[in-house]
Every structure is written in structure tokens, then in C-alpha cells.
Image (spheres, coloured by chain):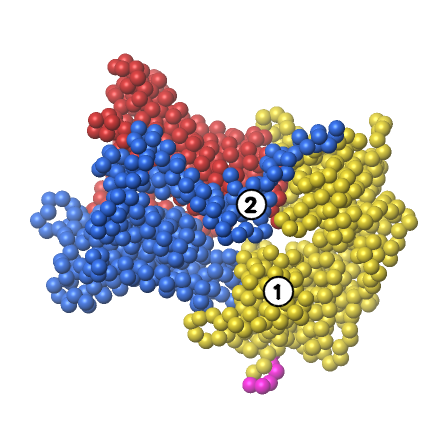
Chain colours: A blue, B red, C yellow
Amino acid sequence: MSSIKTEQQVPLVRMVKRDTITQKKTWTIRAVAFVCALLTGALLILFLGKNPVQAYMDMIQGAFGSSVLRQETIKVAIPLLITAIGISFAFKMKFWNIGAEGQILLGAIGAGYWGFFWADRLPKVILIIVMMLSAILMGGLYGLLPALCKAKWGTNETLFTLMLNYIALYMIKYLQNGPWKAPRSSFPKMAMLQPEARLTKILGVHWGWIAALLLVILAWIYFNKTKQGYEISVVGESNNTARYAGINVGKVFRRTMFLSGALAGLAGFLQVAGCDFTITETTAGGVGFTAITVAWLAHMNPYGMLGVAFFIAILERGCNQIETTMAIPASVSSLLIGIILFFMLGCEFFINYRLIFRGGKEVSHA
Amino acid sequence: MLNIILKLIVAAVIAGTPLLLGALGEILTEKSGNTNLGVEGMMYMGAVSGIAGAYFYEKAVGGNANGVVGALIALLISFLIGAFGALIYAFLTITLRANQNVTGLTLTIFGTGFGNFFGDYFGKKAGGSLVVGDAIKSAFQGVSIPVLSKIPVIGKLLFNYNWIVYFAILVAIAMAWFFNKSRVGLNLRAVGEDPGTADAAGINVTKYKYIATVVGGGICGIGGMYISMVSQGGVWVYDCVSGYGWLAVALVIFATWDSSRAILVALVFGALKIMRFYVELPIPSQFYDMAPYIVTILVLILTSMRESREHAQPKSCGTNYFREER
Amino acid sequence: MERKEKNAVEMQGITKTFGKVIANKDVNLELRNGEILALLGENGSGKTTIMNMLSGIYYPDSGSIRVQGKEVSIRSPKDAFDHGIGMIHQHFKLVDVLSAAENIVLGRKGAVTVDRKELNRQVKELGEKYGFDIDPAKKVYNMSVSEKQTVEILKVLFRGADILILDEPTAVLTPQEVDKLFAVLRNMKADGKSIIIITHKLHEVLAISDRVSILRKGEYIGTINTKEADQQKLTEMMVGHVVSLKIDRPMVEDKKERLKVIDLTCVSEDGVKALERVSFSAYGGEILGVAGIAGSGQKELCEVIAGLYPAIGGSVLCSGTKEGHEVMERIIGLKPDEIVKKGISMAFVPEDRLGMGLVASMDMVDNVMLRSYKNKKGLFVDRKAPQELSEKLIEDLEIVTPGVNTPVRRLSGGNVQKVLLGREIACNPSVLLVAYPVRGLDINSSYKIYDLLNEQKKKGVAVIFIGEDLDVLLEISDRIMVMCGGRVSGIVDPEKVTKEEIGLMMIQVKKDDEEASV
């Protein structure tokens, strides 16, 4: 009698930390979460009175339908991937750099200066190299600034980097309205780059894709094989341990954030010289934020980021497509990205914990 | 001269109110030990839902919409939708123990998309843009409080605002009382400082965290509604929140997690936001626009230089609590 | 009030697992009304776990709990309070920024607002009833360890608990404070309260309890009346076999000065002096024990010497080799890597093993190379040598781990400490600083650590042992330095001093002229 009574008083569900979990189970859980996210997205589309199957089909069509569309998708993926790699540098040491947006813009400014004003004075190869280095430097310095303050006073880097985004944005607006305004234009906008300042295409897409692939490999080696990569991991885990090991935490902050910003700056350069051929307020266009999702979903693994960046690019291109074919605003892409990330964040729980329901039945995932 | 200062202060109050609401929502959230970086997103959600709620009410009743009813609907809906955003965050971080920073950022991405998407979508359906009628618009304009508003200087300074301004100040004062005097407020502070201790004292940590986070999100939502209904005058404007939410998060630090101090800080940042219309300096207008962000950075650096034990972020912020963690 | 039930608490067949680890297996326990029951067991025997289930922190996998004869289900600390059970945790559960009274009233039902004046009066009154001296308005972050403990106990009493559980309450107290605490406990017992005191110290069991229940490796061994118990018998029940609890103290001739600290002064993060004119020398071939109440400057002392924390005055000299000669080098103000560059090998086992000494999420290889990865030139890290060293450590120190690639977080406390100490010893130090090296370790691991330290001592290393258990310090040290409030209150010979004398030195600094020296 009494044992039955106790049985009923056991909490309905309890969670217990898992010791180990097989790779297969991990990926099953992630796949289930992903499908759930797509289903939630479908519900949203259904709520709008549209056919979700049609929408998803159209999205795939919009991303892969023709060689031009495929190239466009790759073009979207390039800055996303490079910026995500940059962000992962910072995130690996738990430095919350959400200023990639601004670092991209500064990179664009750095490249733009040479592209706009030196195109006729420098040979193409030199010009492109100078543009690239200038972008990397500008992005890097913009990333370095919050790291300096964090290292010295522990200044909150999340808000710092974020505020820098807005400052960068107003810098662009200022340049558009004044010093860099296109001659003979009545609108506040910048001129288009001369052909000499534009990137050469390889297989239909500017060479940024090769740079991106190369960076994936380099970043992996940097994280896993080098002393500096090891130092990033130690700092990320515990500042105290890093201090104990004689690692100069401030130096690692500075170095890593320079690299992080530099990569975002590189993405800005590729965007300006390879895609837009000018600079506008939307040059960064939310890439800096979306890249955070890419880095996080890939667990900071460069190879994973390659896949995720490509997937997000498909999503964004697809959403552009359904804006025209189904009259669904393209901003639905941020909604969908948000939903997918919500599910992926949530599913990690079921990888780390298992649930025990009343009566002793265990489930691995819901 | 006095006139200009007066006008500047009045404009600063009006511009600072959404910042105040956002900051208050975040203070309540952080007091429970959750750093929700999704304020910007929740404000977008509140902004679009507030205006959409008022718009659909208007459509439902035809031509004879009542401004007060419309305003209350906007208030309620924006609170609920902001709270819904916070609920997603709460479920992921409290129940599923996801990283607070990343979840908050995702909420911002999601909320921004939510706002712009539904703003576009309803706007297109409405045949161009999402706009509310005059009756409701006027409900969000300043009211001259009888008698009091006639007092010279003070009348203009204090008794001529729209109702949300007073509402926001009331919320700030109520929160100050709640944290300093009430029993539940004391418990909530304990949860934010040290959930393990609160738990051992028999406080339902999960419940407190959920309620504080969700209500906090609702307050942020109201702040967003203010932007679409007051700042933009009842018209949906693409990307209208544009950084207000992030400034609100920064304000929390400057207010040292003290809701009454937040009133003052919000006023200062409100002034920075509208300064260019009142103070003329020989610099391009974009630098005025930068000012709040630059000042934020400077204050961030200054506040990080000094450390205080009591006027600091609740200690458990950023980490999730699990009773059986070993 | 007359109680019908003889037993305040009965726990039957309690089992609790964490992942694969069985913390408690089929444990039975019985607390009588109005008695003090000692719960004895070595570290890791599941004492705290079983009590956490009684106080609602954990929920048992199986088994039943009765309180005053009634079967109950305790799902949260609140449930426990409702049954009159209150626990005083080893790691205090207090909110730093709140006052004593505010902490005491946390989570209590009552009026919408908190009347702080009335509350302070009530708390003061309750304190006086049991002989506590307390300032209810004092903020916890301004309190000493024993004041915090007082608040903890009052918190439980304020809720009207009549079953009190104290988890290792004496670990952080001076011998004098322990006596005071025991007096209070006897008061409470006389007041009709039932008390469980968790401990692994035998003499305390004998001094305070009526009965003793013993746990070993998560299992219930038995209960005996304290009157019929003695140290030997309890030890056998606790460890499972006959052991000598004597710690070795080998004698080493030829002691050379290895470390010299002169007038060292530093300021803590809060701006108060954490160390004030600390001077001492450590010699090769000896273990210098350091005693003191927690927070008396031990942590800062270690960190300043190891180059992790800045000093504002004084000097530290350490023996190193320069051009083949042994010299004393000034190392104050140098960072850890700069100290290494000077040719000085100093090892430091910090108190916070997983938060400072090791990287919890990394495997053994990556942890073993933490202090040496810089030695090789070039951009890349070399994981081959650390891998070999890891394998050697596993063998030499009998480290139990699934492999060198398992994150150290997954290892048990004893094995974590062996990894850490093993790595530090592997760099052939001339000075070895260890802070609380056996905290939380079971007896076997503890003795292994003592052996390792003695081995180093015999090799001519100067070992500095920061400890909390005075019994251990008295046995293993060649000299004991006692610290109080950031100052050295004396350096004494463990053969010629009593525990009580050290206890006194821990709470007050002797005048300079009577300072004992050896």
C-alpha cells in the first residue's frame, strides 16, 4: 500500500546527466530537432495561408534552380563562412564578439578607400592586394579595440562590440553623404568600383570561395595544432587556469580578436570587391549576426561551419525566391533561422541529459 | 535659452521612455539571474504586435474605433507577444539549459525577423503600409493634465506627456519598491545572486526565473510598442527599433541594476538621441547619431574601471541552474 | 509535548546514482528523537549525498523515508522544511549581498513586505536563546567563516526545524570555535532537537555524538553506540580493514634554503591587506605546513609566490641554477613563464584543481602539457611527449581513467589530484607548493598524496603544505607556520605544540617579542 503511495509521489519527470552518448544517437537527436524546426516553419507558412510544401520546393528551386542561382547562393555563403570562422576565434575563448557586422563594414571601408581612389594609379594585382590588406587591417583593429579594454579593465565586450556596429553604420552613412558620395549623384550613395578593383571570377564566382575553403582548413589547423590555438582553448575554459599556466590572457584576447575582426574585414572586402562593387548600409546586411548562428550550430568546427554556412545561404536565397513567387516577405529568413537555431539550441539538452519519467521509463529524446 | 533646455528635456523624456521600458524589463530579467540579450528582438515583437493589434481592432469595429480601447489593446498585445519571446528564451535557458548569450542573440535575430516580417506582411495586406487611424493615434499623443499642466515651467516639464511615459515611471517606482521592500522581491534577488542558496531556502527557483523573465520580456514588448505607436506615430516603419533594445541592455549596467536610477539614465540617453534637433554643433548629422553609442562605450569602460559588490550584476547571471549538477 | 515515535527519521533502502556512479546503495539510517547522531565515513562514501536526499536537494532513485513514523516524499528543500528538517551545508548557502536577517527570512511565507526592524529583533532574540552573538543587519560578505556558520544554523532554527543536519561543520573552524559549536549543539539537544552531524573526524564523533552510523563506499555498514566505540573500531568500520592512520614523517639531513620570503605584503581585490609583512624560509628536505582559518591569506601567499598575483611590498627569493651554480634568484613580480625562464622550477598545486590547475574539459594529454607546451620552439604544439608522460603518470600513480583522451572532468577527485600533482612533480621542482591537497579525497588517495609529498621531501624539495586539518598538519609537517589575518602569527615545531595552541594562534597574532621560532 505504502509503496504505491510513494510511487505516485515521485516527480513526473526527472533529468539525469548523461555520461556518454553514441555519435549515432547525437546525430539522430539533431536530425529530429531539425525536422521539428522545418515543421514549425511549415506551420508558420500555413498560418499565412500558403502551401508550405510549395514554399520549401520554391526555396530549393531558388537556391539551385540554375547555374546563376547556384552561383548566387555560393556568393551568399562566402562572407557568411569567413565571418563565422572569424567569430569562432573569439567565441572559442568565450569572448562574445557580436561586432562582426561593424568589422565587416570597416573592412569594406578599408578596401573601398583604395578601390575608389587608387584604381587608376595602381596595377590590378597590387591594387587588389592592397585593398585586401587594408580591409584585414581595418577589421582587425576594429576587433582589437574592445579586446584592449576587456584585457585592461574587463569591459563588457558584448555591448562594446555591438555598439561598434552602429558606429560603423553611421560612418558609412557619413561617407555616403559627404566625402565618398558619388559624383553627379543626387542620392547619398557611393560610386561603383572600377573594373580594375573588382575580383576575378573562377568558375563563375569571385575567387573568395577559394579563400574561404582555404580558411576552413587553416582555421582547423590553427585551433587544433598550434600553440596559439591551444592558448585560445585554455583561456576560453578558464582565465584562472590560463594565468596559472603563464599565458598572458590579455595578449591572447588582443591577438585573437585582431584575427577575428580581420577575418570579418576580409569578408567585407570580398563583399565589396567581389559582389556589390560599392558600399552601402547593407554591405554587411546582417551577416555578422547570422554568422554567429553558423559558428554556434557548427560547434566552432570549421568544417561544420562550411556545411552550415552553405545551408543558411540556401535558406536566404530561397526566401528571396518565395518573396517573388509566393508574396512572402523575405525577412521570413531571419524568422526561419531563428526557429532553426532555437530548436538546435534546445536539442543539445537531450544530448547532455536523459529524462526519466515516473515509473522508470527512460527516453533519450522527446 | 531656458526655453530650449525645457524643450530638450521634454523631448528627451519622450525619446528616453522606450529605453527606460527596455531597461526595466531587462533589470527584472537579470535580477533572476538570466541575461537576456534578446531585448532588441522582444522590442521588435512588441512593436509590430502592438500596432497590428490596434490596427485589427480598428478594422473589426469599422469606423468608430475608440482610442482608449485601441491603446489598451496595443498595450496588452505588445506585452503578451514580448512575453512570448521571453518565454521561448526562458524555456530554452531555464528548462533546456541552453547558453544564455547565444539564446538571447538568437531571440534578437528571431524577433527582428518577426517584427519586419509581420510589419511587411500586414502592411502589404493593408494595401501598402500598416497604419492606425487618427482616433488611436491621438490616444498616444501627449495629454495636458488639467490644472497641473498650467503651472509655469513645471507644467510643461512634467504634466504634458503621453500616458506611456507615466506608465513607465510607475513601473520603475513599483519595481524599486518590489526589490527593496517586498518579500517576493527579496526572494527574487536571492535567486539571481545564488540560485543554489535560494533553492535550499525553499524558493522555487524555476518558477521565479520563469515569471521574472517572461514579465521582463513583456515590459520590453511595451517598450517596442512605444516605438511604433509614439515615436513613429502609429505607422509601421521597417527596422524601426534599430538599436534601442541594445542601448536598453547597456542602460541596465549604467543604472547599476537599480530601476529608479534607470529613469535618470534613460533621460540622459533620450537626450543624446534627439540632441541634434536642439544643440547645433558644426559636425555632420551622422556624428550626432553616433553619439549615444559612443557614450555607451565610454560609460561601459568607465564603469568597468570601478568595481562594486552591491551595485553589480546579479552573480548568477549567465549561468543556468541545475540542482543535481555535480 | 510527548512524542509517540522514538525515531525522528527512518531511511530505508535508499539508492542514488549519478550517471554510472553509485553514490548510495541500499542505505538504512535511523535518527532518534533528541539525540546527536554522527554520520561517519571517509570522503566519497556518500554521507553528503544521503543527507541531501533528506533535505530535498536530491531525490532518491529508490527507497523510502519516514519522518516521525510517517512515510514522506521530499522533493524539494521546501518539503524538507515542512517536515521540520533543516540542513547546514558544508559550502554555506548564503547570499553574499544580503544581510544575516535577510538570509534567514529567505523563502519564508509572511506579509507582502518584509519588516526589517522587527525581523532583526527576532533574529537577535533567537540567537541569544542558543548563545549566539550575531548582528542581524551585517552583510554576509563582511562576515567571518564562523559568523556565516552561525547564520546558517539560525536560518534552520528560525524555520522551527527540529531535525538538524550539519555537514562537516568543523572543517573550517578553529579548535576553540569547535568547542563553542559543540556547546550550542548540546544546548539544542537539551531543547529537544534531533541532530545529525556529518564528519570524518573520529575524535569529534567521540566527543559529541550519542550514536554513530558508518557509511563506506556508498553502503551502510552499521550503527553503534558512541560509548562502546573507540578510534580503532570506528576506523576499521569506516575503511573496511585495519589501517594505521599514522602519517609518515621521514627525517632528512642537510636542509638547504630553497625559498625565502621577506616582508611580503599584498592587497586583496577588495582593497584590504591580504598579506602583511609575511616572512619565512622554506628548506629543501622538509615539509612546511601552513595552518590558518580559511581566508587568512593562504591563497594570496601561494599566488604571489607562484607569480599569479601582484605584491605591493616585500620580496621572494627562490633557488635556481645559474651557470651551473645554485643561486637565490629574486622572483617577485615575475609571471609564471618568466620564473621558468630564470631556470627556476617551482611547482604549484592550487586549491581550485579544475578551475585553476587543470582545464576540466580537456583530456589528460592537453592538461599535462599546460605548463610545458611553450618549451618547444615553433608554431605547433607537440603532443607526443605529453602523451608519453600521461601514460607514465597513469602507471606510476595508479590513476584510474578510461584513457589519456578522457576529459579530466570525468575523473574522480582523487584521480584529478593525481594528474595535477603528477604533472607538477614531473617538472622536477625545487619548491613544491600544495594547497589543500587532500580536500575531498578518500583515505587511500590521501595517503598516496602524503607518500608523494614525502618522496619529494626526501629528494630535497622544499614542500609547502597549506592545510586545514590540524591533525594532518601536525603529523606530516616538519614545521608549521600559522597565519592569521594575512600575518604570520608564528612558526612552531609540531612536536612541541598542541592543537589548542595552534588554534589560538589562528585567531590572534602574538606580539613580536614572544614570537616562537624553531
For residue C420, the mark is 1
Q: Is residue B162 left or right of residue C295?
A: left
Circle 2 crowding by C-alpha within 10 Å: few under 14, some 14–19, many from 20: many
The chain letter for the residue carrying disc 1 is C
Please give the name of the residue rendered at 44% of the width and 67% of the height, measured from the top-left corner.
A225
Q: Position of residue B276 (x, y in %)?
A: 25, 40
Q: Is residue B232 left or right of residue C197?
A: left
The residue where tag 2 is placed is: A353
Magenta segment includes C324: yes
User: What stretch of residues is rendered in magenta?
Assistant: C323-328
C30 shown above or below A123:
above
Please give the name of the residue rendered at 20% of the width and 50% of the height, measured from the top-left corner.
A68
Please give the name of the residue rendered at 21% of the width and 61% of the height, measured from the top-left corner.
A202
B325 shown above or below A257:
above
- Front tag of 2 and 1: 2
Q: Position of residue C503 (x, y in %)?
A: 77, 57
Quarter of the C terminus of chain C within the rendering: bottom right
Q: Quadrant of residue C95?
A: top right
- Say what secondary structure mark 2 lies in: strand
C9 shown above or below C457:
above
Q: Position of residue C66 (x, y in %)?
A: 76, 34
For this rendering, which residue is in front, B89 or C173? B89
The answer to whether any part of residue C46 appears in the image is yes
Q: Amino acid at mark 2?
A: Tyr
